[in-house]
Image (cartoon, rainbow, N blue to C red):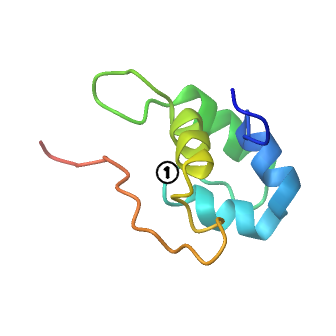
Amino acid sequence: MAKGKMKSVYGIYKKHGREAFLDAAEYYSCHVNLNSVEKTIDEMESRWYDRSHTCTEAEKMVEDYNNGNTILNDDCFAFVDAGQSFGM
């Protein structure tokens, strides 16, 4: 992994704080617990982001963060497709 890249959603939380992290997490998970960062992280690490089960919600958030594609990146309010289509 390149120097300066985040390795986990916990690292993103520690860097940006509780409120900013939980706001950003809502783009990746329907299971954000507004009362507990730890429960939110546990949920994101245990749920698949995509239907082919290649990455978790947490992995996708870290990947997007490292590529500058989250609301937490400087002046970036990029659209994030959560890939969670219901009824398909």
Can residue 38 be seen here? The reply is no
Decide: is 68 above or below 11: below
Q: Is residue 21 left or right of residue 64?
A: right
| Point 66% across, 66% down: residue | 72
Give residue 22's position: percent from left, percent from top: 68, 61
Could you tell me residue 49's position as x and y percent? 42, 36
Identified by mark 1, the residue type is Tyr
Which class describes the residues within 10 Å of circle 1: few (<14), some (14-19), or many (20+)? many
The residue labelled by disc 1 is 28
Quarter of the image where one finds residue 71: bottom right
Residue placed most toward the observer, 49 or 2 = 2
Percent coordinates x, y for residue 78 in the rendering:
45, 69
Residue at point 76%, 50% (across, down): 12
In the displayed structure, 18 sits above or below 6; it is below
Q: Nearer the viewer, residue 11 or 57?
A: 11
Give the residue displayed 50% in from the left and 49% down from the top.
29
Q: Which residue is pictured at 34% across the width and 33% down the height?
A: 50
Left or right of residue 23: residue 57: left
Q: Point out the residue furthest to the left here.
A: 88
Q: Nearer the viewer, residue 69 or 27?
A: 69
**Outermost residue toward the bottom in this view:** 75
Q: Residue furthest front?
A: 3
Instruction: From the viewer's perspective, tell me whether residue 75 is left or right of residue 11.
Output: left
Q: Quadrant of the C terminus?
A: top left
User: Closest to the observer: 46 or 62?
Assistant: 62
- In what quadrant of the picture does the N terminus appear? top right
Above or below, 6 against 30 in this view is above
Badge 1 marks a residue whose secondary structure is loop
